[in-house]
Amino acid sequence: MASQNLSSEESISIIENSLKQTSKQKTGASNYYIIWGLILFVYFLVQFLNLHFKTTTTSWIANNSTLLFPLGGLLSFLQSRKDDKTEVVIPLIEKVYTYGWIAASIGLAVLSFAYFENFIEMLCFGVLLIFGLVNFIIGGVVGFKPLIVGGVLSMLLCLLSVYCDLEYKFLITAIGVVFSCAIPGVMMKSRKNNV
């Protein structure tokens, strides 16, 4: 087998082509956005319906709606296993999503402990603000405008939620999650490039 000596231009061209190829690789982020966007939307909507209508049925559904979170965890785990099997190379953008959402989770946990006596109101405000910040940053880094717009809208809804009764805080949070997670997730899924 004959060895080839590559010129510096050819070497740089090979490296550039490799980087372009990995940058075009699609992440599995859209599935996580859809899973958690829908789960949180349903959770907050059920809480709103319970406070708004106050029936035995809505109360029972609201009390059991926390079971949606283990379901989301299971679906995320299964998606992660699927991603591990299909991803040959993990794109750098994948790390942006991973660390962004780890930071969001830590932020919500810290707020939960710090404001435990007002946990429910803090949860609504925290989800709107932190999801908005994380999605704004991730959207800016990956160049995906629906995440930026959804993030800004979510943060602005924080201002509105401050002046509302608890039931409407739940409704506003449900709307914010749809715009910051579910809709961008569906839009990511339909795109061919790497978001």
Image: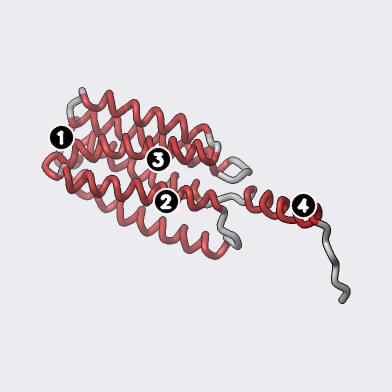
Q: Amino acid at mark 2?
A: Tyr
Query: Residue at position x 70%, y 55% from top?
Result: 18
Regarding mark 3 in the picture, which secondary structure is present there?
helix
| Cα–Cα gap, marks 2 and 1 | 39 Å
Instruction: Tell me: 156 left or right of 120.
Output: right
Q: Mark 3–mark 2 contact, CB under 8 Å?
A: no
Pointer 3 local density, CA inside 10 Å: few below 14, some 14–19, many at least 20:
many
Asked if 56 appears above or below 92 in the picture, the reply is above
The residue at the far left in this view is: 117
Which structural element holds mark 2? helix
Within the image, what quadrant is residue 176 found in? top left
Is residue 99 or residue 33 the one in the foreground?
99
**Distance between mark 3 and mark 2 Cα atoms:** 10 Å
Residue 65 x/y as whole percent: 25, 47
Q: Which mark is residue 13?
A: 4
Precedes in sequence: disc 3 or disc 1: 1
Q: Residue at x 46, y 48 (%)?
A: 97
Residue linked to disc 2: 99
Give the residue number, with chain letter if any, for mark 3.
134
Mark whose residue sits in front, 2 or 4: 4
